Image (tube, helix red, strand yellow):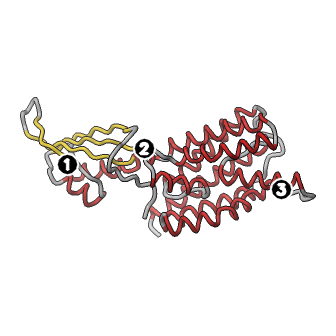
Amino acid sequence: MTRSDIKKYFMVILGATMFSLATNLFIVPHGLYNGGFVGVAQLVIELINRFTSLNLSNNLVGMVNFIINIPIFIFTYRLISKKFFFASLVGMLVITATLSLIPVSSAPILEDTLASCVIGAILGGLGIGLALQYGGSGGGMDILGVYAALKWKGFSVGKLQLFINVVIYCLCAILFDISTAIYSIIFQFLFSMVIDKIHYQNIEINAMVFTKNADIKHHINSEMGRGVTFWQGFGAYTNQETEVFVVVISKLEVHRLEKLIRDLDSKAFIIFSESYRVSGGFEKRLVEK
């Protein structure tokens, strides 16, 4: 296992643990519900407790969530990526273990429900965002969101979570009360926003490069697999010819591109700008193959 692999799995484990801390310390103590399959698992346990003589613990949410995720992981292994499958499996196992082992607070850490929603969303969203950024996920909707983002332009993990969770929170409003549903929606909305901000692969970057080295574009083609459009320019002050090219990459590839360019031309001038929408043949890469 390489140092890069160790870092990747460490960040996936850290992210999954942060999500579980957010759930058991800030969300569940207020009687609120997560989105995605974790929210489904919470609803399953609540309904079993309400309509049967059983009294299941909230710490079983992780195990129920894992069972629901089994068909999703089979789908991931076959259709998305083997590396993504193994990294996501690690994340799922950590979430299962930490949701089971981290005790649910009997009393909320923060009495204010809205404050708990905000802190829980930041902590949990940051955790899942880190897991996704390093090639893993927390399973469930994260995996479906990655697949949807690969297939449809303009789609993101956070957007799919937000869309699916409308159904979950409608059930919360019907089965429980409106305030529970509203606060859960606020939490999930903020949670989804944080994920999309952290998950760099959702963000396209336009790089314009000015260089004297005409070979750089070929290295970008061969080493990064990105298309380059170039033309000849002239410096207004020196009147010297220079090559200008444009390449669109994901935000996660910025460091790699800059290093490649600097190794070949330390004096190259680069302008990075965030692209809010890219239309055409841009290949979105959210997972390692």
- The disc placed on residue 203 is 2
Circle 3: is it few (<14), some (14-19), or many (20+) Cα within 10 Å?
few
Q: Secondary structure at mark 3?
A: loop
Tell me which corner region of the image, top left, top right, bottom left or bottom right, holds residue 57.
bottom right
Q: Position of residue 98 (x, y in %)?
A: 70, 57
SS at badge 2: loop
Of badges 2 and 1, nearer the viewer stands 2
Lateral position of residue 257 relative to residue 67, left or right: left
Q: Residue at x 49, y 58 (%)?
A: 135
Q: Secondary structure at mark 1?
A: loop
Q: CA distance from mark 2 to mark 1?
A: 26 Å
How packed mark 2 is, by other alpha carbons closer than 10 Å (few <14, some 14-19, many 20 or more), is many
Residue located 70% across and 61% down the image: 97
State the residue at coordinates (18%, 42%): 244
Tell me if I can see residue 22 in this picture. no
Mark sitting earlier along the chain (3/1): 3
Query: How far is the residue under mark 3 from the one under mark 1?
Result: 61 Å
Query: In this view of the protein, which residue sits in the foreground, 61 or 271?
Result: 61
Q: Nearer the viewer, residue 142 or 165?
A: 165
On the image, numbered disc 1 is attached to which residue? 265
The relative height of residue 222 versus residue 199 in the rendered view (above or below) is below
Res 185 label:
none
